[in-house]
Amino acid sequence: MTAAQPKASHHINGQYREDASGRSFESIYPATGEVNARLHSATPAVIEQAVAAAKAAQPAWARLKGVERGRILLRTAQILRERNEEISRIETLDTGKAIQETLVADAASAADALEYFGGLAGAITGEHVDLGGDFVYTRREPLGICAGIGAWNYPVQIAAWKSAPALACGNAFIFKPSEVTPLTALMLAEAFKDAGLPDGLFNVVQGFGDVGAVLASHPDIAKVSLTGSVPTGAKVLAAAAQTIKAVTMELGGKSPILVFDDADIESAIGGAMLGNFYSTGQICSNGTRVFVQRGVHDRFLERLKTRTEAIRLGDPLDPDTHLGPMVSKAQRDKVLGYIETGKSEGARLVTGGGVPEMQGFEKGAWIQPTVFAGVTDEMTIAREEIFGPVMSVLSFDDEDEVIGRANDTQFGLAAGVFTADLTRAHRVIAKLDAGTTWINTYNLTPVEAPFGGVKQSGIGRENSRAAIEHYTRLKSVYVATGPVDSPY
Ligand code: NAD
């Protein structure tokens, strides 16, 4: 077996666990189709072990002072940074993303979240409300056991974005990675263990949707946070409804980027490329509908084509490679299907659109970065989330028109505006139905900023102080300072 094979599939109560009776599955290196590792999906017995371990460990963790919990998260962050190269390599093998990206955007972002929430842990407080004698105070209490279910595009980042605030608030956590990318959540579990996190507080159970569904409906689990597609979100919400669980939903998008005539064109092109091609287009907040104002449209397209054709596809482990393959052949074929639909519905292919010839990587899930122009609002490629490196360029004439068109979607995850006009930038952003927005940049998601969607793109927020609200419950305590005034 390869160097990527973990010691066992699951990590429960501080130990690797295996149960070979669970359905077996493989982690595949999508650049070559080679097998990285073989694992087993969690059986009901494994899931129950994780829940029991979390239940046993959580009360003592919740009784610690915030700074004591935070100290362990900070140590975990340091360990992730020390192991960044090793984790990035495994992340590249699991996802196919170029090492140039995984070195800066995956374990590093996970460490940011652990540092942010580690620092915040001692500052999680309630409030005092004076009632002119009597008073009320509020306590921010942990929820208990929280579960996280991950997508395959940012495996270790998603695990940390969910577990860091959960643990900072005094909860225990059970994470189910995507079955497509099971490996680095186990490395996060090792880092927590080595940092001194008490056993049972961070558990990893592997598996398919059925394992996620058990977590989402489990009576002992108080909250579920999903990163995934809208249809999966609807299923997880329905499962969570059985026990009235708290939920955070980070779902899909079809986000707009608006480029006005006065924008810095090279920056707008750079933003649009980052917002469509980074991680081979597999980012939920991608700005896949690029609306370009008529006056700069042709120049924008010409430079976009030149710059897109200069993107270097290649060996994902080569630090000079910009773009790796997609996560799987199934996902690649789905995207190729959308490209065919785009062509047949009349969009004009500007560049890309096919499978590149990659010597030594013939069995990989490769696809060219693709740009369509002449896209109209009704086309399938302008309406559905493709989740691949396919940019649709649409043209527009005026501000009100483009705002209406940008908002004409069931999604509402993200949006971006490129303009040199300060007043227009803020006016337009205020009118866009999106949870996460940018002015004159795109897709930057620092842990300090709330991240999440509106409409069908999600419920709740990750990152920032806002995440604390989603991993705590509020208790109000009324305190009387005199005798009870009763008519009886
Ligand atoms: P997916 O919805 O297929 O799967 C997500 C996770 O849900 C996986 O772990 C899967 O095993 C699990 N799952 C599937 N069915 C389930 C069920 N019935 N009950 C419980 N869990 C179940 O998504 P994906 O293909 O892994 O990821 C791509 C999608 O995720 C895209 O739509 C993308 O936009 C979205 N995404 C959103 C964000 C965000 O933060 N908003 C980030 C990354 C990806």
Image: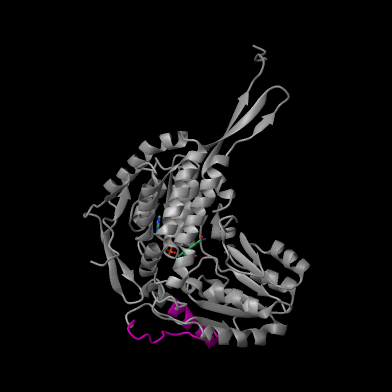
Q: Specify the color scheme.
A: one colour
Residue 294 in percent (x, y) is at: 70, 83
The quarter of the image holding the C terminus is: top right
Task: Kindly identify the residue that appears in the image at 44 percent across and 58 percent down.
Answer: 81
Could one spot residue 232 in this view of the protein? Answer: no
Residue 228 in percent (x, y) is at: 46, 60
When the figure is inspected, residue 91 is found, relative to residue 172, above or below; the finding is: below
Q: Quadrant of ligand 1?
A: bottom left
Task: Kindly identify the residue that appears in the image at 68 percent across and 31 percent down.
Answer: 129
Q: Let me know if residue 25 is in the magenta part.
A: no
Q: In this view of the protein, which residue sits in the foreground, 75 or 197? A: 75
Left or right: where 39 falls relative to 153: left
Left or right: where 163 falls relative to 487: left
Q: Quadrant of residue 325?
A: bottom left
Q: Total marks drawn?
A: 0
Q: In this view of the protein, which residue sits in the foreground, 357 or 196? A: 196
Could one spot residue 301 in this view of the protein? Answer: yes
The boundaries of the magenta stretch are: 335-361
Q: Residue furthest front?
A: 82
Task: Kindly identify the residue that appears in the image at 37 percent across and 63 percent down.
Answer: 86
Left or right: where 438 falls relative to 113: right
The quarter of the image holding the N terminus is: bottom left
Q: Let me know if residue 340 is in the magenta part.
A: yes
Residue 441 in percent (x, y) is at: 63, 69
Residue 299 in percent (x, y) is at: 66, 87
